[in-house]
Amino acid sequence: MKARNIHQFIGFGILRLCVFMVLSALFVILFDIFSKGHQSVSWEFISAMPRKGMTEGGIFPAIVGTFFVTVITAVLSIPMGMGCAVYLHEYAKDGWVTRLIRMSIRNLSGVPSIVYGLFGVVLFVQLLRLDTSILSAGLTLGLMTLPWTITASEEALKNVPQSYRDASLALGATKWQTVRTNVLPYAVPGMLTGTILGLSRAAGETAPILFTGAAFYLPFLPKSLSDQFMALPYHLYIMATQHHAIDKVRPLAYGTALVLIVLVFLMNFTAVIVRYKLRKVKME
């Protein structure tokens, strides 16, 4: 009995140490970005256009470009990803073909984002002739987010007890009626949570938009989906590594990083709120 308690104490101690190390590293990174970037963040910095080669002004075009790309990503990945998850879990037969599709989807989740960027250039920019634009970048990010959305949605569907389906079918409901009324209401909170987390990841990606539409410097807003755009991740990458006056724009780079982190945090916080609201409605 004593040996078991000792092993348990050591195991929990190692887990606590791992959590402490991860949180400490996160705290150091966030503290460094906040301490060096909060002085640059102001209303003018958020709402103004960049000036003089991005050495002055704000990041408003980058915020707008990130917003539009994220919306296109959501339009592509959410309906298609959720629909694919519903079909795989509720309708597809459990055979080698279905298992192969699931394995492929999980493998696609681990493909580096730069590969999606190169694929987006070939498919959207060259083959479909959408040119380097907001639409090409959004569709590329949508493809990158799709495996994540499918996996998260299918896991949410697995958490719905089988008895809910059996009871509905026993009462004479059709398969679709069962899915629509007895499965999706309980699975949607988890599906949306995973989807929003995937979108927040996509909003911070640089490689997929590097080749498909992001521009180095545009002191104006895009007028259509076929225009090039500025985006916060690429804007930060340029100012931190490629700018001709890196030392001069370093405070602006830290300010951009802080704004991007806040936007990603707000998206993650939105996922938590949506999950809580839908669970509350479901319980009522």
Image: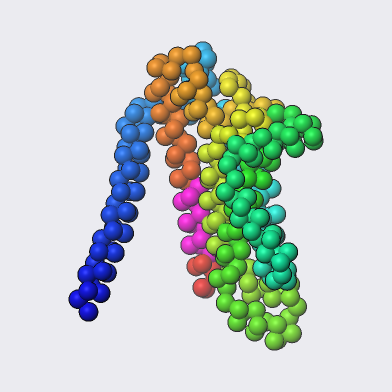
Q: Which residue in the rendered view is the most extreme toward the front?
A: 3
In the rendered image, the vertical position of residue 85 relative to residue 236, given as above or below: below
Along the line of sight, the residue nearer the viewer: 170 or 110: 110
Whether residue 151 is visible, yes or no, is yes
In the rendered image, the vertical position of residue 113 relative to residue 165, given as above or below: above
Along the line of sight, the residue nearer the viewer: 134 or 107: 107
Residue 100: give x, y in percent of width and height. 69, 61
Magenta portion: prevailing SS class: helix
What residue is rendered at 48% in x and 57% in y? 273
Q: Which residue in the rendered view is the most extreme toward the right?
A: 128
Residue 232: give x, y in percent of width and height. 53, 32
What residue is rendered at 35% in x and 38% in y? 29
Whether residue 63 is visible, yes or no, is no
User: Picture quarter containing residue 97?
Assistant: bottom right
Is residue 32 left or right of 240 when viewed as pictured? left
Q: How many numbered tags mark residues here? A: 0
User: Picture quarter containing residue 213?
Assistant: top right
What residue is rendered at 70% in x and 86% in y? 171
In the rendered image, the vertical position of residue 181 relative to residue 221, given as above or below: below
* Quarter occupied by the N terminus: bottom left
Q: Which residue in the rendered view is the most extreme toward the left?
A: 2
Is residue 269 left or right of 10 when viewed as pictured? right
User: Picture quarter containing residue 257?
Assistant: top left
Q: Which residues are magenta?
A: 267-278
Residue 71: give x, y in percent of width and height. 63, 43
Residue 58: give x, y in percent of width and height. 49, 23
Is residue 243 left or right of 82 when viewed as pictured? left
Would residue 203 be counted in the magenta stretch? no
Is residue 242 left or right of 84 when viewed as pictured? left
What residue is rendered at 59% in x and 40% in y? 113
